Image (cartoon, rainbow, N blue to C red):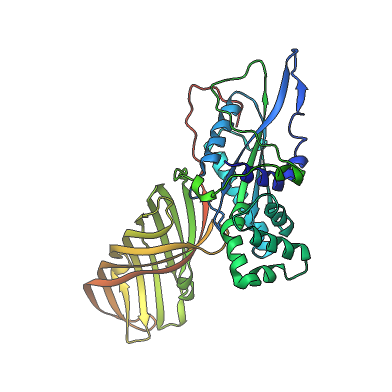
Amino acid sequence: MRHLEKLFIGLITTVVVSATQAMATPSLSSSSGGGDSEITESISGTQYFPRSVSTIKNISSDLRNLAHSVDSLYRIRQIDSLLISGNSSPDGPGIFNRNLALDRAKSVYNYINFATSMPDSLMRVSSHACNWADLNILLTSRDWSRPSAASEAIRIINNGGKNIVANLRSANKGELWRWLDAEVFPLMRATSVIAFYETDPINLTPEIPMYEVIEPEPDCEVIENINYEEINPVDDVVDDSPWRRYIYVKTNLPAWLCLWMNAAVEIDITPHLSATLPIYYSGFNYFSRTLKFRTFAIQPELRFWPQKDNHGFFVGAHFGLAYYNVALNGENRYQDHDGNTPALGGGVAIGWRFRLNSNPDLTMEATIGGGIYSLDYDIFHNWTNGLLTGRKKRTFYGVDQAALSITYRFGLRKRKVETSVEKGGDR
């Protein structure tokens, strides 16, 4: 983690850290019962996010190392508190940026909660949508690769007014905005974590890895004196994010237009594998006694996801069972034989799950599938208490699944494996 990144994130979180000092022990305090002194220090880590994204796909090594240290410190009862502060760059609507910053903080909170033994009572979550004043501080904090672009951006920001975005976008035929988007804004799309802990200067534990202490500096002049290094936030990530199980609750929107009440539940089994169970029911006529598609159907399915977070594209294999009573305004009505001989079969499906907005838990799912079913049904005249006129057995081939579902997921907490190491307190 390089100095510029740490100090800028420290600047953003200075106000929040100050507000939480009541949670932390003062910088120097006497330990109870003895003459030694306990010093409150801090360690920090940062996770960067792509534009408009609040989910973590690649945990940065900085955040991973912090989680390891926090867990070790908590187990020996030294952690006082932990502050998580989400941030977003100013290039976007204000309300969206505020929600995005908070969602990023929640994503990092979920990771810390997963990767450590820290109880919720010691963690605080806050967020900050960076404004143009924050951008001004960042631009003046170092020598950029294009100093003329930085100076022009500072001039536009200092002029103020309601047209800062428009002026930045139009400057130098858009080159200024492209430079900001490539080199500057990525630094502001970050979530920082600061953990406060107590150390005993006499009895330090050498085997616990300590990382560079970050002290947020309220005075911008201090950071101007530091010789910063070139940075690239995306170079500091590794693909070792922990997998987390979810339960998904969903409903097929087009089916409701056909007066089919429906709901489905899906659960992650492993990375790349999930199981879903949709249920459909319709007990209604379509505004006429001779037009109906009454059915009760279930279609359990096992799905394979190429992405390990069980998102995006999937393929599935399903089993189908359906009781039915169908009339299409024609001469005949068709019902499964004796009302207890459902259609039986199965098939395969493909689909895609995608996000609707910045909320990672709310998604949309499109799927289509085909199958083969064995049918055994009675044929009646299509009027009230119509006479039985025949019975037919046949095999159906064709589309048996078409859905556009809205989905909401709920996380399942991963149970921690107890070891011989003493925990630092009750969860």
Q: Residue furthest top?
A: 34
From where the camera sits, is residue 167 visible? yes
Q: Quadrant of the C terminus?
A: top right
Left or right: residue 183 compared with residue 384: right
Q: Quadrant of residue 45?
A: top right
**391 in relation to 154, above or below:** below
Q: Position of residue 141 (x, y in %)?
A: 69, 49
Q: Position of residue 337 (x, y in %)?
A: 28, 69
**337 in relation to 102, above or below:** below
Left or right: residue 90 compared with residue 70: right
What residue is rendered at 77% in x and 62% in y? 158
From where the camera sits, is residue 15 visible? no
* The one of 220 and 74 positioned closer to us in this rendering: 220
* The one of 206 and 75 positioned closer to us in this rendering: 206
Q: Quadrant of residue 422?
A: top right
Q: Position of residue 208 (x, y in %)?
A: 55, 25
What residue is rendered at 76% in x and 70% in y? 162
